[in-house]
Amino acid sequence: MSKKYKIKKKVSQSVPEKSSEINPSSKQTLAKSNQDTEVTLILFDKKTNWFLLILLVTYFTFSLLKIHSSSIANWDRLFGIQNSESIIAGKAKAIRADEWVITTPALMGQYKLGLPLKNEANGGGNAPIVFGLPIKDISTILRPVAWPYFVLDFERAFSFAWNFNIFFFLISTFLLLMLLTKNNFWLCVFASFFLLLGTGIQWWSYTIASFMIFLNGTLLSFIYLLYAKRAWVIILSSIMLIVCIFSFLAFLYPPFQIPLIYLYLSILIGFLIQKKKFSLIKDKWPIRLAAGTVSFIFLGVILFHYYLIARDTFSIMANTVYPGRRFSTGGDLIDGKLFAEFFGIFMAEEQHPLQWGNICEASGFIMFFPIIFYCIGYIFLELKKIDPLLMSISVYLIIGLIYLLAGFPAFLSKITLFSMSPSYRALPIIEAGNCILLICFIGNRQSEKVLTKLSWLEFGSLAVVVFVFFRFVSSHVNNTTNTFFTSKQITIVTFLFTVVYLLIRYKDFKFVKPALYLILTGISLPNLLVNPITKGFAPILENPLYNVSKEIDKKDPGAKWALFGDIRVTHLIKAAGVKIFNGVKYTPLLEDMKVLDPSGKKDSVYNRYSHVTMTTKIQTNDTVMFELKGPDSYTIFMDPCSPRLKVLGIKYIAFSYEPLPSEIRCMSPVIDTAGIFIFKRNDQ
């Protein structure tokens, strides 16, 4: 046993559950610890407070300056401006069309219309509610991410909301990991950025991070509600708890949310068993009970109100062909995808295996669980005990891997709600859980008792096994992707991650952790370039079509539009607050579809979340045709002069190309701008 270890052991005996980050020479810290009988929570010392302050100041500074990382500069490129002046650094990613084409213009249109509950431009029912758009409603009091839209101009409000997903992910993740690792400051700083820079977060424009923020907050608030000693902390925790719960539920995307809920439930169970001191919850129990009761009554009232305004829309969603009736039992993960992120350093927007769809679908988090499972087993054999937190997360990962690779019986998928999360959506969440397991393992002090023993036989044997494992995995991934990766890249992956795995095993040796942090940071740092640094909204606000659409709508408010041609253009019109018939519909416009399809024979085509394209097809009998292009897209073929469009109240028709005379025989020209031709129907 080394001298260094003996010193640490002595400190841990004199100050129960305090981490190595606490300076044993500090009389003030020791005095505070001796007086404090509560379970060790987060130590808000000087460096912790400075770190949090820096993040908050940066968040407010960037947001007030209208700086964000949206890819909206692609609107400039779409209209022929190759070098957008809105880009400060990096490059706008065209593949992030879900963001710059769909979500961001929908936010702009919602803001322009005054944050209504109903907005047909986004879909049927009260579509803005269930898809997380800001709404003018009492329930927004529990959605801090939506607050800026009520007090700021759109550019700054958007920046505050966008940057919330970055900086509050860092803050909430840091604080949760401080709790789980017993205040291992530098590990938590590293881990917060490491998780944020995971391609599963970056390439999905922080979608996963936006859910994790509120689950981080839920766990933190719940644990403080149970164990905090000060009354004001208990009350604040109860408030934060219901804010986080509601915010998590206010934007529904079950494919990510369901596996995330189980992940955080496993973390909570492991933490509570690890701490054990349930008797301390009885201290100040009247305050805990009162604060929790009042808060949950208020949450219940808000949730009931939310249900009343959203239930019809929930019903529409639940009965859609996609995604409502989608049912997954797992077991259908693409072969070779499980360890795909080992090759993440060699993939880019236009460089990825075709089998994995696109770079977003190919993204995720690095898998560490094989070596961690080995270490946990090694510790158990030596000590005959296992850390409950590590065990609980490990059980979650094992169950998740079974779902991904073998699948669940149908009844189990249904009762666990995993039926809503296909394997390819559950995978990045399980990968994120595996990263949290890594952080908890690195911060675990129990391992020092056995993992600091060096056996050259074990080292040599383990090195060979790990090397063979990576050689096999790399070759398998390459074979399943039709040898997409080169032999040199396979060699780099094999040697690089063999070193990483060995560093994890020998983490408690001197200088090993800093080496591990440096290597993983080097792997992750290039992901900073995934999203651009953008200032303002000039690519949309200065776009001629946006301004023309806004002016027409100002003179003829509430008029409905339709667009034939490039579906992307519909969203630029939508951003101006225009009620446009097609484009992306979060929920189908079923009543409108009855006009186009009175018999309902094509219900299976249009009854879905979908990208709706309109294409000209002129026939004497005014036939309307529907063609399914994919699970979330279809095309309507019809005559732009069809009387059915009059029944739908569509007054303006736009074309993303110069239309033929036969297409506009019933219309009068309004204006053509930026290659878009706008007409007004003569019968409206």
Image: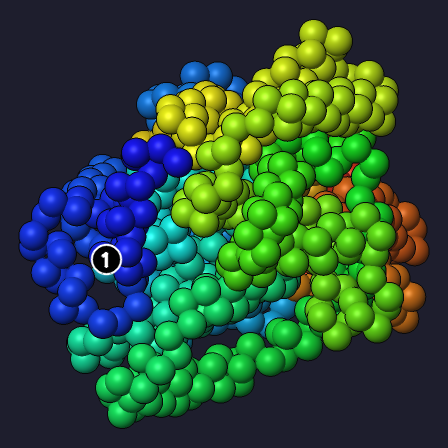
Looking at the picture, tell me which residue is in the foreground, 92 or 225: 225
Q: Is residue 48 visible?
A: yes
Q: Total number of numbered labels?
A: 1
* Quadrant where the image shows the C terminus: bottom right
Describe the element under mark 1 as helix, strand or loop: loop
Crowd rating for badge 1 (residues with CA inside 10 Å; few <14, some 14–19, many 20+) = some
Q: The disc labelled 1 sits on which kind of residue?
A: Val
Figure quadrant of residue 498: top right
- Identify which residue is drawn at 51% across, 37% down: 451
- Residue placed furthest toward the top: 488
Coordinates of residue 527 in the picture (x, y in percent): 48, 27
- Identify which residue is drawn at 55% across, 77% down: 310
- Identify which residue is drawn at 79% across, 24% down: 472
Looking at the picture, tell me which residue is in the foreground, 487 or 320: 487
* Quadrant where the image shows the N terminus: top left
Relative vertical location of residue 18 with respect to residue 655 in this rendering, above or below: below
Scheme of colours in the image: rainbow
Coordinates of residue 304 in the picture (x, y in percent): 49, 86
- Residue placed furthest toward the front: 1
Looking at the picture, tell me which residue is in the foreground, 199 or 143: 199
Figure quadrant of residue 139: bottom left
Q: Is residue 155 visible?
A: no
Coordinates of residue 495 in the picture (x, y in percent): 63, 15
- Identify which residue is drawn at 50% across, 52% down: 106
Along the horizontal axis of the image, is 265 left or right of 536?
right
- Residue placed furthest toward the left: 27
Figure quadrant of residue 235: bottom left
Say which residue label 1 marks: 15
Along the horizontal axis of the image, is 600 left or right of 391?
right
Coordinates of residue 356 in the picture (x, y in percent): 75, 33
